[in-house]
Amino acid sequence: MTAARQGDVADPVSGGGRPVRPTPRPAPEAVPPADDRLARELLDGLAEAVVTTDRTGVVTLVNAMAARLLPEIAGKVDLTVAPVPALADAVRAGTDGFDAEHHGRRLRGTRRDLAGGGSAWYVRDVTEEHARTDALLAERSRTAFLAQAGSRLGVSLHRDQTLRTTVTLPVPYLADAALVVHVLPAPTEDLPHWIRYAADDPAPVTGVGSWQLPGAVPGLAEALDGDVSDPSPWLDAELTDLAALLPDDFGRPDTVLVSPMIGAGRPAGALVLLRRAGRPAFDSRDIELAREFATRAGAALATADLYGEQTHLARVLQNSLLPPDLPSVRGITLAGGYRAAGDSLRIGGDFYDVFRTAEGAMFALGDVCGKGVGAAVLTGRVRQSLQTLRLVEQQPLALMRLLNRALFDAPDAARRSQFTTLLLGSVRREPDGVLRVRIAGGGHPSPLVLRPDGTVRAVKVGGMPIGALTDARFTEAEVVLAPGELLVAYTDGVTEARGGPRDLEMFGEDRLHQALASSVGLPPEAVIDRLLQLVDEWLDGQSQDDIALLAVSAQQ
């Protein structure tokens, strides 16, 4: 007998015969809403407008949100002629969406097909979403503008370039025309200068105004005085005096915004932004952006002024420190050469000087420890001391000792901790035409003598640097130059110039000796020019130390 399977039911007639399987139950059907009122409540509870139409395009249903956003659609309206232009245009064109303004709100609609050929339009109010997006885009645009302003103003170190950048950047992004009113740094004329750029100008235009100009523009006098209060736009103001500074075809400005340009804690000028009629007035974000830009422009202008002052001072210093024109001395031929260490103003710590004496000439060639303006200041002190001390002492060794003492007698000698290597020499022409040269050494590279046969010999002088020790020791040597022989003194910028095939190899003494040997027969000036050219070629554009060269020979 076969056992009944679990779930089988015994036949009630046979009582235990063939099992009978239960009949499966049908799946439950979806229960529709109990009535139309529930469906209506569900539609009215939606946060988006719903408009349904039949297959002919006639409205069959409008929910509560649709009645609020699209009050014109009521009853059985044909959407193709509905008084909602964007929706009607979309229905006529057969498109599935629209995005447009309606009653001051931004609406976005999407169409879906319904059973029976009808359609449903789902319309959302995206006004706040658009506002957030527009605000984000506007903020990104402002950030990009300030980034560009910072980049262009940051690389400008000249006053005129900074002013041109200041008036061109805001046009047309912030204004139809921009004007900067400023006063030139002392000791130039004390009148307000201006620079203007308008959208139709091919380039910025400059001019000089009178002191009536600040009083003619509301807020301009206060901005030039450094008033840091929030700038306020002037609407439809009478600006008769300002009209003369604008293009002839600009017309009457509709809105004017004046912002102070503060730099280094003082007023650097004022930025005036102007908008034509028909353009929206400056809003709060525009005012904030204009003020931030004016502040950055003021800082850049102050930096440019400071750079200009430093450049002027450096040029004055340059004129006093550049090697002088060599004097003409009977029976003696002199030549000099100079290169400063990567300084466009051509000032540095290497120097040479030549002075006439009753018996011939005195020369000095030195190398101050360090580079740049600090070294140049000490260079000036050494040269001025030599100019004075040579009047009381013309023996090289004694003069070097006096110079060392003079440097230590200076008030700030202990704080300076700077020293100078130096060669001091006296040149005297003998009756037989030779030159007798006495050279005192203060820790400087030995000068070289070039013979007519091409041999090169160093004149050992040694000694200790000037200004290093109060009891420094110095030495002296004497050399006789026959006609055709040449004495060359140089600073270590020549031998320590790094370049060549590997860009790191020093020019060195051997190359210097070879360069001199190959210059036999050339006049002193040509020899100096050749040495400088060879060093420049060795450097091949790389940075260098200061270089000074001085050549002495008997006049033939």
Image (spheres, rainbow, N blue to C red):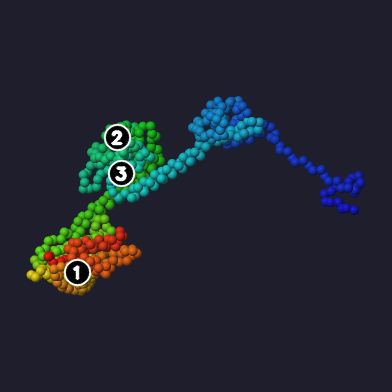
The residues tagged by marks 3 and 1 sit, at their Cα atoms, a distance apart of: 57 Å
The residue labelled by disc 3 is 164
Q: Which mark is residue 247?
A: 2
For marks 2 and 1, the one nearer the N-term is: 2
Indicate the amino acid at tag 3.
Arg
| Quadrant hosting residue 179 | top left
Instruction: Report if the CB atoms under discs 3 and 1 are less than 8 Å apart.
Output: no
Residue that appears at 38% across and 32% down: 278
Give the percent coordinates (x, y) of residue 14: 91, 46
Q: CA distance from mark 2 to mark 1?
A: 71 Å
Residue 412 in view here: no
Front: mark 2 or 1: 1
Q: Quadrant of residue 236?
A: top left
Q: Regarding mark 2 in the picture, which secondary structure is present there?
A: loop
Question: Which residue is at the far right?
Answer: 14
Q: Position of 388 compared to 196: left or right?
A: left
| Residue under label 1 | 450
